[in-house]
């Protein structure tokens, strides 16, 4: 569910016509809907309310300070995966006690920075990392707190791309569940690190409930075994991964459905619960607006060349991801979409590749896509681009990164200005 709708034959974000934003801010531009963002955060919070969980937004999905601040003000904590993300979370005003830090390759400087900030917990991925955090905390004269990330070895389902599957044995994340007991035994009396929690994250996006049920059931069994051996598990962090609707309105389950299955598994336990949703909160809350630059024919293929490239949105080429793309103002009123659906057949449409300006064959937003007729200057909207969209953008081909805009009702604000050519070279020295 989101607040990007066609009204009077034209796409609006909340009450603002998308074309107005493009005219004033230029293209390509990321446009976020505040109402959509907060709706999804509250949906997660309400669905899991019986558990009174700690919700830590996965800042890597969309890390704009303004977006973070809105979520922090709504009560959300932050899940960070680097020193840079920790810096952002703190800069946005997040209470360090609501920050958790994950990642397989934390450097000594990053660990020091996090201990110094007083974060809630590290999500720890290996024995070597346990020893390192303990050592660094010792040198600082402090005690760090951590959760052990376990790898529950569950298959997240066929719809999850190999590059975003994280909870199988062959993935680099966490420690095998069989080894976890030994790790708790081995490290139960560390001087400067207290391992009080368990963490898991099985991948993203997850479209089914079963992988979560399987992973949490395994985690619960492990917690029982650990408790019998005298280890106190104070919290279980079940990670993120809830999917969103890319292809059609019923593609992803609402989080309420996940909660129906998961809350009973977690309720009444002697430990607290944490969640780390990213995509679910911000995925449908953002779109990209891009303008058609040229059209051309190559053999039998028709290309629509737009001003957004893989540097702006890399998901199609990195993950074979599907984004619904449609004209902001369809010339023919018959082409105002009733719903965003991959099977939508436009009236008098054509099949095209929608490509960017970058010197790579992988530079496309869509291939073989049925689209209404478009011409130079037309605006297209690329939907469900809020998560892992701007966050993964780059300056490749020396393209300044796009602007980001936040819409609130009938107003919009630039929350990141478009980069300039001077920005491109600013850190460089001759
Ligand atoms: C990326 C990530 C998340 C967030 O995943 P979403 O699919 O965006 O919800 C949560 N936890 C960890 C450890 C992650 O790496």
Image (cartoon, rainbow, N blue to C red):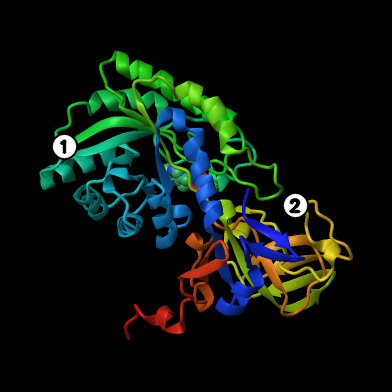
Q: Position of residue 23 (x, y in %)?
A: 62, 78
Q: Position of residue 92 (x, y in %)?
A: 34, 58
Q: Residue furthest top?
A: 228
Query: In terms of image quadrants, where is residue 323?
Result: bottom right
User: Which of the two marks, 1 or 2, is nearer to us in this view?
Assistant: 2
Question: In the displayed structure, would residue 357 be above or below residue 342?
Answer: below
User: CA–CA distance between discs 1 and 2?
Assistant: 55 Å
Q: Residue furthest bottom?
A: 430
> What residue appears at the point 47 percent right and 39 percent down from the top-left corner?
45
Q: How many marks?
A: 2
> Closest to the observer: 287 or 336?
336
Question: Secondary structure beneath disc 1?
Answer: loop
Say left or right for 420 vs 27: left
> What residue appears at the point 24 percent right and 37 percent down from the top-left corner?
145
Which residue carries the number 1 mark? 192
Question: Secondary structure beneath disc 2?
Answer: loop
> What residue appears at the point 34 percent right and 20 percent down from the top-left corner?
270
In the picture, the quarter occupied by the C terminus is bottom left
Which residue carries the number 2 mark? 339
Q: Position of residue 273 (x, y in %)?
A: 39, 31
**Dot 1, crowdedness within 10 Å: few (<14), some or many (≥20)?**
many
Disc nearer the start of the sequence (1/2): 1
Q: Are marks 1 and 2 in contact (CB under 8 Å)?
A: no
Q: Position of residue 8 (x, y in %)?
A: 76, 65
Asked if disc 2 is less than 8 Å from ligand 1, the answer is no
Say left or right for 67 vs 300: left
Say left or right for 141 vs 160: left
Residue 47 can be seen, yes or no: yes
Residue 170 can be seen, yes or no: no
């Amino acid at each position: 569910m989101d607040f990007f709708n066609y009204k009077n034959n034209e796409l609006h974000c909340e009450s603002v016509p998308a074309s107005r934003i493009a005219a004033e801010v230029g293209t390509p531009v990321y446009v976020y809907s505040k109402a959509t963002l907060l709706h999804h955060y509250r949906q997660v919070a309400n669905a899991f309310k019986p558990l009174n969980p700690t919700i830590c937004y996965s800042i890597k999905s969309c890390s704009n300070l303004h977006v973070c601040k809105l979520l922090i003000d709504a009560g959300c904590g932050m899940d960070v995966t680097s020193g840079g993300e920790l810096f952002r979370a703190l800069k946005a005003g997040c209470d360090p006690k609501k920050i958790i830090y994950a990642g397989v390759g934390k450097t000594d400087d990053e660990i020091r920075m996090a201990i110094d900030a007083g974060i809630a917990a590290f999500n720890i991925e290996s024995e070597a990392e346990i020893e390192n955090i303990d050592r660094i905390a010792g040198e600082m004269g402090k005690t760090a707190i951590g959760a052990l990330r376990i790898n529950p070895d569950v298959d997240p389902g066929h719809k999850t791309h190999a590059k975003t599957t994280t909870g199988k044995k062959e993935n680099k994340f966490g420690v095998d569940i069989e080894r976890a007991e030994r790790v708790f035994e081995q490290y139960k009396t560390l001087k400067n690190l207290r391992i009080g929690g368990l963490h898991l994250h099985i991948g993203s996006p997850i479209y089914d409930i079963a992988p979560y049920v399987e992973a949490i059931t395994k985690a619960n069994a492990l917690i029982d075994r650990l408790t019998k051996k005298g280890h106190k598990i104070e919290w279980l962090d079940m990670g993120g991964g809830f999917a969103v609707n890319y292809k059609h309105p019923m593609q992803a389950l609402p989080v309420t459905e996940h909660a129906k299955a998961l809350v009973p598994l977690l309720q009444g336990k002697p430990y607290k619960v944490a969640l780390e949703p990213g995509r679910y909160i911000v995925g449908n809350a953002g779109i990209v607006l891009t303008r058609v630059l040229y059209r051309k024919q190559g053999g039998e293929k028709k290309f629509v060349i737009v001003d957004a490239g893989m540097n702006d949105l890399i998901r199609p080429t990195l993950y074979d991801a599907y984004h619904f793309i449609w004209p902001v103002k369809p010339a023919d009123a018959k082409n105002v979409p009733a719903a965003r659906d991959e099977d939508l057949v436009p009236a008098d449409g054509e099949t095209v590749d929608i490509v960017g300006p970058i010197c790579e064959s992988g530079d496309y937003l869509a291939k073989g896509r049925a689209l209404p007729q478009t011409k130079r200057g037309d605006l297209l909207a690329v939907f469900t681009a809020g998560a892992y969209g701007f966050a993964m953008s780059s300056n490749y081909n020396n393209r300044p990164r796009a602007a980001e805009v936040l819409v609130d009702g009938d107003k919009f604000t630039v929350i990141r200005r478009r980069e300039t050519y001077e920005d491109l070279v600013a850190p460089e020295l001759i």
